[in-house]
Image: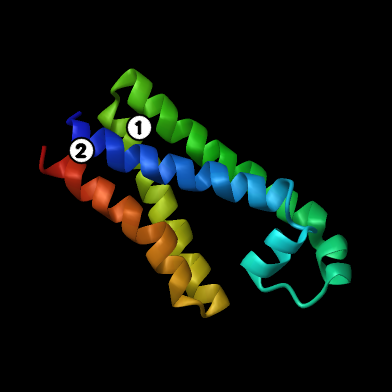
Amino acid sequence: MTFLTILLIAIVAFEHVYFLVLEMFLWTKPKGIKTFGLKSKEFAEETKVLAANQGLYNGFLAAGLIFSIIQKNVSLAVFFLICVTIAGIYGSYSTKKIKLFYIQAIPALLALVSLFFQ
């Protein structure tokens, strides 16, 4: 893997570690409520278990990407980047927030392109 590819994969992995922190630990805090546009602190409290579950899955995506860098395993990187891309597409479609596509799917797509052209 080239330096650029590793950097792009690392950025995607870092994003997902950040999502993990937001969803598992900051969901009911002002930062989490503002970031996700939650309607109230009460709603955040009612949904914190679901958010923590989402955060855990984001952690698994980050772990897979980090592992692919450590192992220099292109196939593994492709798999996890495709998973991230699909999650970004579905997330932006289901929430009707195109910003999700730009934040999650575009960096993963850039890393995929870098992998295919190295």
| Amino acid of disc 1 | Leu
- Which residue extends farthest front? 30
Locate residue 16, reporting x and y percent: 51, 46
Q: Quadrant of the N terminus?
A: top left
Circle 2 sits on which residue? 4
The answer for how far apart the CA atoms under marks 2 and 1 are is: 17 Å
Q: Residue at x 46, y 32 (%)?
A: 64
**Image-based side of 77 in relation to 31, left or right:** left
Of pointers 2 and 1, the one earlier in the residue sequence: 2
Helix, strand, or loop for circle 1?
helix
Quarter of the image for residue 73 reads top left
Q: Residues within 10 Å of mark 2 (few under 14, many from 20)?
A: few
Which element carries disc 2, helix, strand or loop? Answer: helix
Quadrant assignment, res 4: top left
Q: Quarter of the image holding residue 36?
A: bottom right
Image disc number at residue 76: 1
Q: List x then y, in percent, for residue 61.
A: 50, 40
Q: Position of residue 2 (x, y in %)?
A: 17, 31
Q: Nearer the viewer, residue 46 or 94?
A: 46
Nearer the observer: mark 2 or 1; the answer is 2
Q: Is residue 57 left or right of residue 89?
A: right
Color theme of the render: rainbow
Q: Residue at x 58, y 50 (%)?
A: 19
* Residue count near mark 1 (Cα–Cα under 10 Å), binned few <14, some 14–19, many ≥20: some
